[in-house]
Image (tube, grey):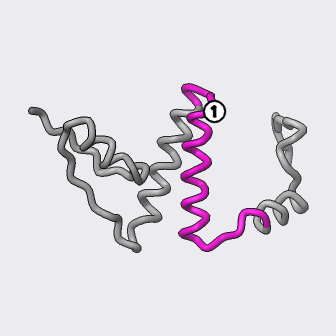
Amino acid sequence: MARKKYNKLVRDLIPEIIEKSGKECKWHRAQQRSIGGYLSKKLVEEAKEFEENPCAEELADVYEVLCAIEGVMGLNRYTSLGAKAVDKGRFDDHIILDWVED
């Protein structure tokens, strides 16, 4: 059998799902000091997948990673989102910035 290396963050139930399918896997919990890096890489991975296939399932993956980052950083999304929305607006009007002249 071929062994494929991943070394990436996965959803919590993935090892169990793999084992129930009759395959073997090895996993470990990320150390506190490295979880930020794993989450950052996962966010980029999931954002690329959403770009390639913009659907609810891929968006849910992006959202889950953002929630995990929020938890690790001890942030409150409502406070953070509200403050930034007041200062710089949201994305509701779909503004495309073409250029800025100095």
Find disc 1 in the rendering and name its residue: 56
Which residue does the image show at 21% across and 52% down from the upper left? 26
Q: Residues within 10 Å of mark 1 (few under 14, many from 20)?
A: few
Q: Quadrant of residue 35?
A: bottom left
Residue at image x 84%, y 66%?
A: 83
* Amino acid type, mark 1: Ala
Is residue 77 depicted above or below 1 in this figure? below
Q: Residue at x 86, y 44 (%)?
A: 101
Q: Residue at x 51, y 33 (%)?
A: 49
Residue 85's quadrant in the figure?
Answer: bottom right
Where does the N terminus fall, quadrant-wise? Answer: top left
Magenta-colored span: 51-78
Q: Position of residue 20 (x, y in %)?
A: 27, 41
Dominant secondary structure, magenta: helix
- Given the current orientation, which residue lies at the most extreme top position? 53
Position of 19 compared to 46: left or right?
Answer: left
Q: Position of residue 46 (x, y in %)?
A: 51, 41
28 or 32, nearer to the observer = 28
Return the residue found at the far front.
Answer: 20
- 76 left or right of 28 in image: right
Question: Where in the figure is residue 28, as x and y percent of width and height?
Answer: 28, 61
Q: Secondary structure at mark 1?
A: helix
Numbered circles on residues, count? 1
Outermost residue to the left: 1
Q: Is residue 37 covered in magenta?
A: no
Residue 54 within the magenta-colored segment of the rendering: yes
**Residue 61, quarter of the rendered image:** top right
Left or right of residue 7, residue 81 in this image:
right
